[in-house]
Image (spheres, grey):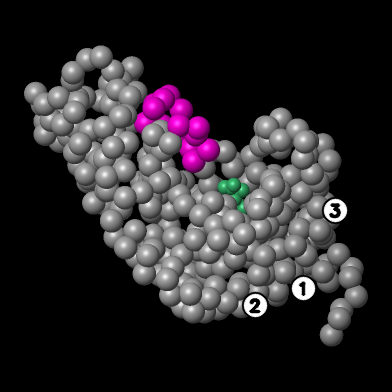
Amino acid sequence: MENKKLIFSGIQPTGTFTLGNYIGAIRNWGPLQDEYNCIYCVVDMHAITVKQGPVKLRQSTMNSYALLMACGIDPEKSILFIQSHVKTHAELSWVLGCNTQFGELSRMTQFKDKSQRHPDDINSGLFTYPVLMAADILAYNADLVPVGVDQKQHLELARNIAQRFNQRYGDFFTLPEPYIPKVGAKVMSLQDPTKKMSKSDDNPNAVILILDDKDTIIRKFKRAVTDSEAEICYREGKDGINNLMTIYSSVTGKDFAAIESEFAGKGYGDFKLAVGEAVADHLEPVRTEFARISQDKAFLKKCYTEGAEKALRYSQRIVSKVYRKVGFVDKT
Ligand code: TRP
């Protein structure tokens, strides 16, 4: 690979992404491919820390992979692969786990939240989830990791684990830094604009999925919660309108002043329709590309097989050195 900084990111195999995931993260991944060496991974091993049906997991993993391609990640430019295909992640995870304290993992807020939500299944994978995530990143000695706020604590832990390893065994791991995208807005729920848009929302009208068809998108925007005024402007307290303006701005490139004058004197109904249409038009190429890629199973398989080979080749060198450093006997 060329001598550029290395970006690593993992994404859960939910099978579809929300407009929030798309605008806040995934859409920015494509353009990074020219500036950085990029490695992207669908984290199916992380997914089984909460109960999954096998048929559904397999399907969602494939769909997530195809969707990343449809969103502009080019497997020729980046390494794009499925986590369980590359054994070094689990191998390194064990070694890193032996350099991670029980106390540190107990403090992870995601672990605490998830154990509260699934009290009948507080499995040890859920507890060591951040160790596997550290292994994902450190197996490539990544420089930068694009993460949202909810993953910051895990990235911080990955740095601490790396640092501890370096102190014990001699400088080896790069300490990964968070990558904050230059552009990227936070998208809120359409039904409660004080909350982040989330796929797990009980109300389907709160969430735009990037594979929703045009009618569905427009219908959801028409039902979006706003306020009792009638003025389209970005102002504190107007959470619903602010959110719609943010979304409209990020899909059209217009700034808030331009949007305010475009809709001066117009009603919320007109504005919601315009936002819905703009979003649907913006996502149309993603939907078309997804349909094309996902019906070509042979092509998809070729991409993820080659991705896994490249990822293994890259990470194997690093994990072999780790094995040697900790004192495992050389196999060859
Ligand atoms: N934990 C991340 C999430 O839920 C996904 C993930 C797994 C990840 N491994 C990673 C993100 C490595 C960045 C780097 O969003």
Disc 2 packing (10 Å; few <14; some 14–19; many ≥20): few
Whole-percent x, y for residue 18 in the image: 43, 45
Residue type at numbered disc 2: Arg
Whole-percent x, y for residue 127 in the image: 77, 43
Q: Residue at x 50, y 34 (%)?
A: 201
| Disc 1 to disc 3, C-alpha distance | 17 Å
Residue where numbered disc 1 is placed: 320
Tell me if I can see residue 4 in this picture.
no
Q: Quadrant of residue 20?
A: top left
Mainly helix, strand or loop, the magenta region? loop
Q: Is residue 261 magenta?
A: no
Whole-percent x, y for residue 236 in the image: 32, 19
Q: Is residue 323 above or below residue 203?
A: below
| Disc 1 to disc 2, C-alpha distance | 11 Å
Q: Which mark is residue 98?
A: 3
Residue type at numbered disc 3: Cys
